[in-house]
Image (cartoon, rainbow, N blue to C red):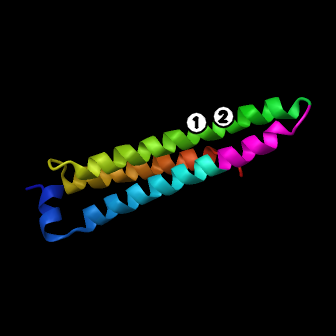
């Protein structure tokens, strides 16, 4: 018999705690992304020559990868909230999600 995440929520709020942490991570990442993009855009405005064009492309790549990471976090949070999800299914999905997130973060340009 599979244990559902809804059953766990009744006796153990760890899933809700993880969802809250994921939500906080999303907010922190989004704030950091916007702050970094704004700061870099300010620097970019003062540059001349070919460097701004190359840098703008790298910046767009960083933004796109960050948005993909935010989307993965959102999908993960939704899956945690499904009442019909089983613990095994959630664990498997979590491992896959974190593998994709780690790969994505590894592909981000160094700040």
In this view, 52 is above or below 43 = above
Q: Which residue occupies the foreground of this view, 69 or 32? A: 32
Query: Dot 1 corresponds to which residue?
Result: 64
Q: Which residues, given as a range, are shown in magenta?
A: 36-48
**Tag 2 near tag 1, CB within 8 Å:** yes
In this view, 109 is above or below 21 = above
Q: Is residue 82 left or right of residue 30?
A: left
| Local secondary structure at mark 1 | helix
Residue 25 visible in the shown view? yes
Residue 47 part of the magenta-drawn span: yes
Percent from the top left, x then y, of residue 17?
30, 66
Mark linked to residue 30: none
What separation in Å lies between label 2 and label 1 (alpha carbons)? 6 Å
User: Which residue corresponds to the image point at 7% horizontal and 56% vertical from the top-left?
Assistant: 1
User: Which residue corresponds to the image point at 38% horizontal and 45% vertical from the top-left?
Assistant: 74
- Quarter of the figure with residue 44: top right
Q: Residue furthest right?
A: 49
Mark 2 closeness class: few <14, some 14–19, many ≥20 residues within 10 Å: few
In this view, 87 is above or below 50 = below
User: Which residue corresponds to the image point at 80% horizontal and 44% vertical from the top-left?
Assistant: 43
Query: Dot 2 corresponds to which residue?
Result: 60
């Amino acid at each position: 018999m599979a244990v559902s995440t809804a059953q766990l929520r009744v006796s153990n709020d760890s899933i809700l705690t993880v969802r809250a942490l994921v939500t906080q991570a999303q907010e922190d990442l989004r704030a950091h992304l916007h702050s970094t993009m704004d700061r870099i855009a300010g620097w970019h405005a003062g540059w001349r020559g070919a460097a701004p064009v190359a840098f703008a492309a790298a910046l767009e790549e960083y933004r796109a990868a960050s948005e993909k990471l935010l989307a993965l976090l959102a999908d993960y949070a939704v899956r945690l909230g499904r009442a019909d999800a089983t613990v095994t299914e959630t664990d498997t999905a979590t491992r896959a999600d974190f593998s994709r997130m780690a790969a994505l973060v590894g592909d981000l340009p160094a700040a």
